[in-house]
Image: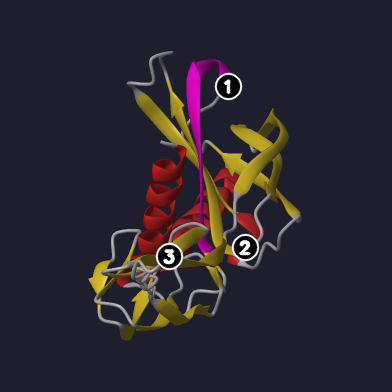
Amino acid sequence: PFLIFILLSEILSFFSCNKTPTSPEPPKIISLPVINEFSANPSTIAKGQGSQLKWSVSNATTASIDQGIGNVSLTGYEYVYPEKTTTYTLTATNKDGSKTESCTITVKSAKLAIDGKIEKDYLYGCPVFKGWVKNVGDNTAWNASITIYCYSDKDKTVLIDTAWDYLADGNDIDPGVKVPFEAVCWELSSHSQIKSRKVVLDWLEKELSELTKEDFEKIAFNKRLWIENQRRKSKAIRR
């Protein structure tokens, strides 16, 4: 029996050594898309301006950009007008997977705010609100105004007068700069008539590449209000 075991072992070893080896499967080659370029020019704009997104993709079947742009060609450009600092992401896809790349457009924006407390006073016998407005944004404001709506009730339903002032006479208000205001209620005789009020600050961005029709109307409207304000002031002085 021992000799038979040795013989069988030798036979099995012979066939095992002469077994034809199987070839390993070749490794799978993965070829992802290539994003050659994705840029924004300019990358920093003022609120209201536009920027050009430009991209170039190869080895891809589809490409898309988020922020509402959607599917795009593999090479192209598009103008965008973000209202605030926005990051755009380009996604390129093929059968092996996808690649992404992002670029950010920084939007500079002016922001006016009341600086400190609004003081009450009288000017030529009429109630007046005095104080300061500061540009706390990072862009220059201009054609700025303050409007104070005055109501005879606490629920702000009965408007009895509107106090208005042209901030910096419509000129530039740079970031970090504060300017005074003096808004007069020409139709009233006492602060006691005012039970509630609403303050509205309005301005245009300095670096706009072009003004819209609404912007020109706002400029003209503020100039008319300024002229009317001067007329009322002269009338009050003569009283």
Left or right of 96? Residue 199 is right
Residue at horizontal 26 percent and vertical 69 percent from the top: 95
Residue 193: percent from the left, percent from the top?
50, 18
- The residue carrying mark 1 is 191
Kindly report which numbered mark, 1 or 2, lies closer to the viewer in this rendering: 2
Asked whether residue 147 is in view, the answer is: yes
Label 1 secondary element? helix
**Which residue is more in the foreground, 17 or 197?**
17
Q: Which residue is mark 3?
A: 17
Q: Earlier in the sequence, mark 3 or mark 1?
A: 3
Label 3 amino acid? Answer: Cys
Q: Separation of disc 1 and disc 2 at Cα?
A: 26 Å
Q: CA distance from mark 3 to mark 1?
A: 109 Å
Q: Nearer the viewer, residue 143 or 102?
A: 102
Q: Is residue 67 left or right of residue 121?
A: left
Spatial CA distance of label 2 from label 3 is 100 Å
Q: Residue at x 43, y 75 (%)?
A: 50
Q: Which residue is mark 2?
A: 169
Q: Are marks 2 and 3 in contact (CB under 8 Å)?
A: no
Looking at marks 1 and 2 on the same chain, the residue that comes earlier in the sequence is marked by 2
One can see residue 52 in this view: no
Residue depicted at x 40% and y 71%: 27
